[in-house]
Image (cartoon, coloured by chain):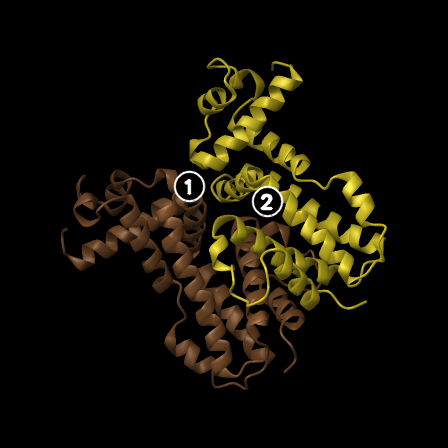
Chain colours: A yellow, B brown
Amino acid sequence: MAGNPERRAALVDAGIEVLASEGARGLTFRAVDARAGVPVGTASNYFTGRDDLLRQIDTRLHTRLAPDPEVLTGLMRAPKDRALVTALMRDLMRRVTRDRTGYLALLEMRLEATRRPPLRDSFTTSARGELEYGMEFHRQAGLPGGDETVAVLYLAMLGLLLEHLTLPGVLDGVLPGVDVPDGLVERMVARIVPAE
Amino acid sequence: MAGNPERRAALVDAGIEVLASEGARGLTFRAVDARAGVPVGTASNYFTGRDDLLRQIDTRLHTRLAPDPEVLTGLMRAPKDRALVTALMRDLMRRVTRDRTGYLALLEMRLEATRRPPLRDSFTTSARGELEYGMEFHRQAGLPGGDETVAVLYLAMLGLLLEHLTLPGVLDGVLPGVDVPDGLVERMVARIVPAE
């Protein structure tokens, strides 16, 4: 395997763009080479196969979509109440909206996982890890509610992210006076997370 | 346009299978003909183009995934409380699990909608219609909670359907003693829907 880390990262990012714009079926080494602007055959020197590329894309997306440590530290100075949970969820929403391509690629990977058992297994491990990390973070920070709160909030946020990224007009104005996504996130948290 | 309604329905159902198994990019008239086992060129006699086929798939999926009127009538004999909301959500979950192919096709259409504005517009109209119908149904039936309850429950169910259909192992056993999906649906409703 070729070892230039910058080129590898550029190829993985090109793979993310291909996934989001062409769908999983469009993700070929040739398409990745073209998107990255490198000679045909380059990607095949960096990945053992398509599953290897998909796994590296998954890892990269977890980094790309992760919270900014400084923003997180700033947020965590606030009292550990429901308002802080709202702020954390709004920050997640902002990160996803800013890297729309990255999140659309993750959604494509979910659907591709239904067709490829090895991808489903590795993707399940990383998504489960994220959920368990969220539960642990919530507990350690002393935020209100337990694992069940985090699980329900995780599902509602997953639904909101899917809807807002694919069909934003469905939610727009459906609750008068509640703006999307910020107002809706606040209402969601108010229903799901106990007051303290 | 050719007019045999049974053949049209068979072609639309074949399109749904192609979407779920190959992804949106695999959806060509040729693939639909092959899946339906009809001569090459048949689909092009029934649909004006790919967007027309996608619209007809959307309409068909709303019928395929709709509640069974008898089941619904039976459920609606119960008191109009939170337990009834749980039963209705479990019924939705059952329908989607039974027609997994249909729901995966809907998810493919959402992603395809991000690339095709005409599809996004028609799909937004039908999805918004479903959400508003849900709000109206909830109100007319006298179920607990208002439009905001329905909107938050809709998003949490959307997240649960996505997770359970694509990466079921993420939720499995994450809350000890809560089975997926039935137990989790009950916990979700208990958090989101007011007691009365």
Q: Amino acid at mark 2?
A: Thr
| SS category of the residue bearing label 1 | loop
| SS category of the residue bearing label 2 | helix
Horizontally, is A161 left or right of A22 in the view? right
Q: Does residue B22 appear in the picture of this structure?
A: yes
Q: Does residue B172 appear in the picture of this structure?
A: no
Q: Can you identify the residue that label 2 sits on?
A: A97
**Quarter-wise, where is residue B84 in the image?**
bottom right
Q: Can you identify the residue that label 1 sits on?
A: B115
- Residue B98 or residue A34, whichever sits in front: A34
**Measured from the top left, where is residue B37 in percent x and y?**
22, 45
Q: Is residue B111 above or below residue B4?
A: above
Count of numbered circles on the image: 2
Quarter in which the C terminus of chain A is drawn? bottom right
**Quarter-wise, where is residue B60 in the image?**
bottom left
The residue drawn where x is 64% and y is 32% is A60
Q: Amino acid at mark 1?
A: Arg
Q: Are marks 1 and 2 in contact (CB under 8 Å)?
A: no
The residue drawn where x is 64% and y is 14% is A4
Q: Residues within 10 Å of mark 2 (few under 14, many from 20)?
A: some
**Measured from the top left, where is residue A166 in percent x and y?**
49, 49
Q: Is residue A79 above or below residue A26?
A: below
Q: Residues within 10 Å of mark 1 (few under 14, many from 20)?
A: some
